[in-house]
Amino acid sequence: MEKWPIGVFASIDAGLGVKLEVAHELGVPTIQLHAPAPATRTPQNAEAFLKRLKEYGMTLTAVFGGFEGESYADIPTVARTVGLVPPATRDARAREMKEIADFAKLLGCSVVALHVGFVPHDKHDPLYLQVVTVTQQICDHCQRNGQSLHLETGQEPADTLLGFIHDVGRPNLFINFDPANMILYGSGEPIAALRKVGRFVRSVHCKDAKWAARPGEEWGVEVPLGEGDVGMENYLRTLHEIGYVGPLTIEREIPQEPERQKAEIAHAVRLLTELKARIG
Ligand code: MG
């Protein structure tokens, strides 16, 4: 694959991505896919999906897990509902994540990813060890499938994330770096964080955001690519610096406004194409 193929985050029937035909209209060569709903994750659907990808000439580069009951309404709600951290849903979600990895395998995809949730920043919190253990189990399942697991960044400062990856201690655990999430959650300046965790970055999101007045207490605001505080040119230069050559996957999380979402992603494709020509 060429360096930095452009991609978009896509969805079938769950998640905030664009529809596959929109990805096709945008003319991008790669997609990441939000895992479809459980009832849709059948071998027949996998086959039909692969056929469409082939028709469109697109490569699937990662499958993202997501779960019923997750809410990104505000930061405390994320902590309470997202990923593998909440104890009440952890076992069921771990099982589902393994099923999602198996579905990704049917799609021939060797990368699965997820928002693990708010990993406690204090290693002595009993929740911390529980999240380490469940992540090890999922990594081991992925390993048997010949897959790696990518953690979406956002909720943790870079040092917490590095400590967590170290404690999980699995060779197939990597990072999907999302610079906008660092700003939205107020978990650290994204470019400095990217330099710190660079050696684990195996996939990225191209998304932009503006800092909140009180970062970490309230949300920042997601904005069209190039209009936020990430600094796209600096972002791409830093990706180049750390030796990242994988896809640049655009994410714009406004599925409630599909026309605007498509127009803004088209603009993002142009911006990245122009930056790639200069930097890549
Ligand atoms: Mg993201």
Image: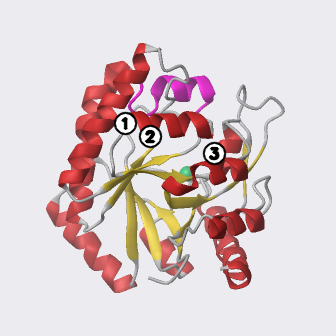
Left or right: 10 in relation to 67? right
Residue 124 percent location from the top left of the image: 47, 15
* Magenta highlight range: 73-85
Front-most of residues 235 and 269: 235
**Which numbered tag is attached to residue 165?**
2
Q: Are marks 1 and 2 in contact (CB under 8 Å)?
A: yes
Q: Can you tell which of label 1 and label 3 is closer to the viewer?
A: 1
The amino acid pointed to by label 1 is Val
Q: Which mark is residue 168?
A: 1
Question: Where is residue 74 drawn, in percent x and y?
Answer: 62, 29
* Residue 116 visible, this orientation: no
Query: In the displayed image of the protein, which residue is found farthest to the left?
Result: 43
Q: Identify the secondary structure beneath mark 3.
A: helix
Which residue bears the numbered disc 3?
181
Q: Is residue 153 left or right of residue 21?
A: right
* Residue 62 on the magenta segment: no
Q: Are marks 3 and 2 in contact (CB under 8 Å)?
A: no
Above or below for 62 versus 119 = below
